[in-house]
């Protein structure tokens, strides 16, 4: 018999930039990628602005190609990056690209370009929220041991309508033994607290998957982890 959990959603917010997506080191590397020249005199506080100014010296598709080269390197073929550099001007690749494992990085590329070009690229929207899960017995939280994404996503899906995207696209995985896509749907997951009979997580992902949770405050649901392959 599966455990029934009380689930509370709190601090739901829309964000346009992911934590730790960009930093001073990445800005320096990107300037080098653009053959900017000597960066030793640039104050750290000016790196982001300088990087964005440098990228806008290029046509939008050229700028997108530079970022795709930097982020993906040889994980995408040259022809793919050329095509995607045109597509990202109009399309939200972090929602539409077939390989879910690349979505978070596409979001970071899109966010940078959107900001640099003052909205000429598609508007990036991610969500950040907290999930507080309560059980009758603390040992029931064993379903979240190890990699928690699959069990947590099965739980969250039950708080959203039947016709929400996750429920429509991943019915087999939600009910089945493996949900490998869960780690690519939940971009960043932080286990916050375990206190008595409650456990809390912070989830960051695309609004594409979780916008239906915006007005959800609480619900009851069951879940289960992925089956462990011992072979």
Image (cartoon, rainbow, N blue to C red):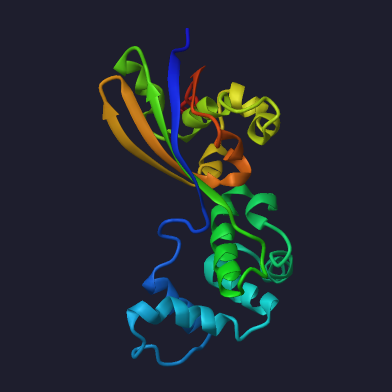
Q: Is residue 201 above or below residue 83?
A: above
The picture places residue 227, in percent across and down from the top left corner, at: 49, 24
Task: State the image quarter where residue 66 is shown.
Answer: bottom right
Name the residue located 70 percent from the left edge and 67 percent from the top edge. Answer: 89
**Which of 2/208 is in front?**
208
In the picture, measured across the screen, residue 59 lies left or right of residue 108, that is right
In the picture, measured across the screen, residue 40 lies left or right of residue 112, that is left
Q: Is residue 183 above or below residue 24?
A: above
Q: Is residue 126 above or below residue 142?
A: below
- Residue lying farthest to the left in this orientation: 196
Numbered circles on residues, count: 0
In the picture, measured across the screen, residue 42 lies left or right of residue 70, that is left
Q: Is residue 77 above or below residue 6?
A: below
The picture places residue 97, in percent across and down from the top left corner, at: 68, 53
The picture places residue 94, in percent across and down from the top left corner, at: 62, 54
Name the residue located 64 percent from the left edge and 74 percent from the top edge. Answer: 65
The picture places residue 210, in percent across and down from the top left corner, at: 58, 39
Task: State the image quarter where residue 60 is shown.
Answer: bottom right
Name the residue located 65 percent from the left edge and 29 percent from the top edge. Answer: 167
């Amino acid at each position: 018999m599966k455990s029934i959990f009380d689930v509370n959603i709190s601090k739901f917010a829309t964000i346009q930039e992911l934590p730790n997506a960009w930093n001073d080191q990445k800005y320096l590397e990107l300037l080098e990628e653009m053959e900017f020249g000597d960066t030793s005199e640039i104050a750290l506080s000016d790196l982001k602005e300088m990087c964005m100014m440098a990228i806008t010296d290029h046509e939008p598709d050229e700028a997108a190609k530079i970022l795709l080269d930097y982020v993906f390197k040889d994980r995408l073929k040259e022809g793919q990056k050329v095509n995607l550099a045109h597509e990202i001007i109009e399309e939200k690749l972090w929602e539409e690209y077939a390989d879910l494992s690349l979505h978070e990085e596409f979001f970071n590329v899109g966010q940078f370009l959107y900001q640099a070009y003052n909205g000429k690229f598609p508007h990036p929207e991610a969500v950040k929220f907290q999930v507080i899960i309560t059980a009758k017995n603390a040992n029931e939280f064993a379903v979240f041991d190890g990699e928690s994404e699959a069990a947590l996503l099965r739980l969250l899906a039950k708080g959203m309508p039947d016709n929400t995207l996750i429920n429509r696209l991943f019915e087999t995985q939600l009910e089945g033994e493996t949900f490998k896509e869960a780690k690519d749907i939940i971009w960043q997951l932080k286990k916050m607290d375990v206190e008595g009979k409650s456990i809390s997580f912070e989830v960051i992902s695309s609004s594409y998957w979780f916008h239906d949770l915006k007005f959800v405050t609480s619900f009851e649901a069951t879940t289960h982890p992925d089956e462990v392959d011992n072979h």
